[in-house]
Structures are given as structure tokens and as C-alpha cells.
Image: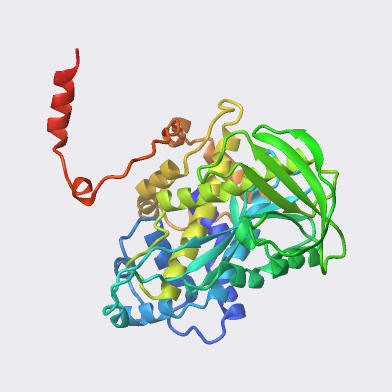
Amino acid sequence: MARVALEHALPSEWMDTVFEEHRQRQYSRELLFSTVIELVTLVSLGLRPSLHAAARSLETLPVSVGALYDKVNRTEPAVLRALVRGSAERLAPVTAGWEGEASLPGWQVRVLDGNHLPASEKRLVPLRGHRGAALPGYTLVVYDPDCGLVADILPCEDAHQSERAAVADLLDSARPGQLWIADRQFCTRTVLLGWQAAQAGFLVREHGRHPKLAAERPWRACGRSETGEVREQRIELTGSSQPWRRIELTLDTPTEAGESVIRLWSNLSERVDARQVARLYRRRWSVEGMFQRLEAALNSELRNLGHPRAALLGFATAVLAYNVLALLQRCIEQAHQAAHPALQVSLYHLALQVRGGYEGMLIALPDEPWLSGSTDPAVVAARLLRLARNVVPRQVAASPRKPKPAVKKGYVDSKTAREHVATARVLAQTKAERP
């Protein structure tokens, strides 16, 4: 299933064409861009521990390892963005006929958030004299919670660049019929007017220093939602051709940050009830869950790649692999829906299954059985569903657990914090104290 989905989402000829269309200074001679993506994918899937080990797995590498790293270190962000966007567009039609609950019927929901890469190892010579952490950059991610796919990314090499400044380059992907959901850091005049100019809807949390309003109408009560009282008012922003809505949710239970009131800005029409708008904003947390699954199931943070463009390439390749696994996840749930209607496939266990059998299958079988012979999404979906019926649901099912109770730790001095204990002695003492 993984090989069929990969061949549909990332065919070699298509990846090389994308590279040629979006490259600026790079070029291909002996080393094709599709070969680079193939090697980095092996690392992202956990089949190889490093890019050097992946390169040694090839029978014939057309260039030296040093030339390979030079190619990786110069991968242009525009190529990475085109690759992720194109692969998502190739995978989305495969799930067109599958059942699924839409967040807002008639709208394509897009959740926007940023993912900052952790500090890398200081293998680059200019970094060795710095005591501080070396940050290789971050990526703005656009997530489709209904399809479960990452629809777009915007890699940023400068880790200290504000996300508000970088998001301006992402507004070109907004389309009519899309609803963009974002956190308060994106509540700026430029971003909101950009979405409105594209005739797209938006739902953004209000920032403490939100854009200056030209007019505010009286509040009106809208009843209760599952989490608190809801009210709304009409607002007008200078430069906007139409009034917007401000929805206020007074929470029954404050957030972890101690906030009890959440205000949202939206340009959705009043046909969408204010309580429904408040519920829609909770979909923003779906992107946080996606980041957690991406980090747990795949090697999305390659700390041994210190160059910003190389680290961003590693994250973008992990996103490509995540989209393939997300497609397989929905396919297995769809194939076993009749017998297991409550089945939730774990992306982590699914990745383990792929790692365990993928390389052996490539060795045991020639290339012909993998090729479907058709690029029609309906044909690919039918073949994936046929294969998914052979999957044992118990082996890939999720095992949800209750959330840990929030226990606030008190202050202790540094000497106490550095102390250590022997686990065996603590357990023996606890056992002796039992009545």
C-alpha cells in the first residue's frame, strides 16, 4: 500500500519536472532531484539513520557524497513548497469518494500554524564558536483536517524572522470557498485583508494589539456552547469593504494559560451561527495533533543536518511521507468500517508496519507488481482499498489513554532538583509501607 501510494504521490519524472519548473539557481546533471528525495525519504521513514547511510545503500551513487550534501544544502525553499503542494493535490482526489464528516459543509478548511525546528548539531565550522543553540529555521504549515493532509508549506530559513512577516508569501494560495483558521499571531491587518481580497473566509483569534477598528456595534447574546457563553458583535476595519464579526466565548473553565475569555474575528456570513463558529475554532488544535504524530511516527527533525536548507528539506520530506501515511490511515479505516465502525488507525503503529516490511518486499518482489498502470485516482483508490482489507485492524489500531491530571509542581531549590534516587529502592520502600 505504501509503495502504491508513493508511486502515485511522488513519481520520479514528476518530481524532476517540478524541480525544473521552480528552481532558480540549482540544476541537475548527474544527480537527479528525485534521487535526493528518495534518499532523504529513507531517513524520514526511519529506514536509514542518516543521509550518509542512505547514500551508501544505493548500488551506484552518480556523484560523490560531498556533492550530495552540497545539493541538499542548496535546495531552494520554492521547490520544497511546490513539491508538497503538488503531492497533496495528487493525493486528495483519491479520497474523494470516501465517507467523512466535513468541518463546515460547503467549505474547504485550512488550518495555519508554524513549526520551528529544534537546535541542530554544530557540525558547521562557523557554528562551533557559539554557545547558544543553532536554529535552522521554521516552516509555516497549512493543514486540511477533513482530508488529513498537509496542503501547503512555506519554509523559512531565518529562525528569527517573524511568522507574521513570512505569512504574506502564503496568501497567494488562498482561494474562494476556503476557510482559514489561525491563531492570534496572524491577526494582522495585512493577513486578514489578504484573505478577504482572495474571497476566502477566515477565523482568527483576536490579538491583544489587534488592528485598529473603525466602528464597533453593540453586543448581542447567542446562547451557550459546550464550553461557555457566546456573544457577538459587528465590527468594521478601515480598508475593509464589508463588516466583520467578533465572537466572544466566556469559558466555564479557564485555559492552561489562565484565560477565561476568547475573542474571534471572522468574515463568515451570519448563516453560520456564532456558536458554530466557536466550535469551528477548536479545529485549530488539529494541526497541533498533526505535528505530534509527525514527530512521533517519522524523523522530521534531522539534527545532524545543520544547514537551514538541508534541515528544511528533511522536514518537507517528512511531510510528504506523512501525507502518504495519512492516506493509508483513512484507507484502512474506510475498508474496515463495516466490521469495525469505531476503528482509529494509529499513524505510529502504521509507520512501524511499513518499516518492518517495506524493504523486504522490495527485495522479494520485482518492480512490476507495484506498478498500477494507471494514474486515475479512482483506480488507485480501488486498489488501495483492496489491499487494505488484508490489514489486521488490531495491529494498527490506536490505543488512546486518558489525559494525565494537571499537577502544578512547586518551587524547589537547585540542589533538590539535581538530586537522584534509585528506582528499585523507592519501589521497595513503597511496597514495605503498604498495609
Which residue is most to the bottom? 25
Which residue is most to the top? 435
Question: Can you say whether 241 is above or below 75 in the image?
Answer: above
**Residue at 74% of width from left, 46% of height from top?**
247
Q: Position of residue 418 (x, y in %)?
A: 19, 49
Left/right of residue 134 with respect to residue 146 in the rendered view: left
**Residue at 50% of width from left, 60% of height from top?**
115
Q: Which one is nearer the viewer's eye here, 65 or 223?
A: 223
Residue 4 visible (yes or no):
no
Residue 48 visible (yes or no):
yes
Q: Position of residue 70 (x, y in %)?
A: 38, 81
Q: Which one is nearer the viewer's eye here, 175 or 171?
A: 171
Question: Can you say whether 138 is above or below 103 in the image?
Answer: below
Left/right of residue 29 with respect to residue 98 in the rendered view: left
Question: Can you say whether 91 is above or below 123 in the image?
Answer: above
Q: Position of residue 220 (x, y in %)?
A: 82, 41
Question: Can you say whether 218 is above or below 253 in the image?
Answer: below
Left/right of residue 59 with respect to residue 83 in the rendered view: left
**Residue at 72% of width from left, 45% of height from top?**
248
Left/right of residue 244 with respect to residue 358 in the rendered view: right
Q: Position of residue 162 (x, y in %)?
A: 55, 70
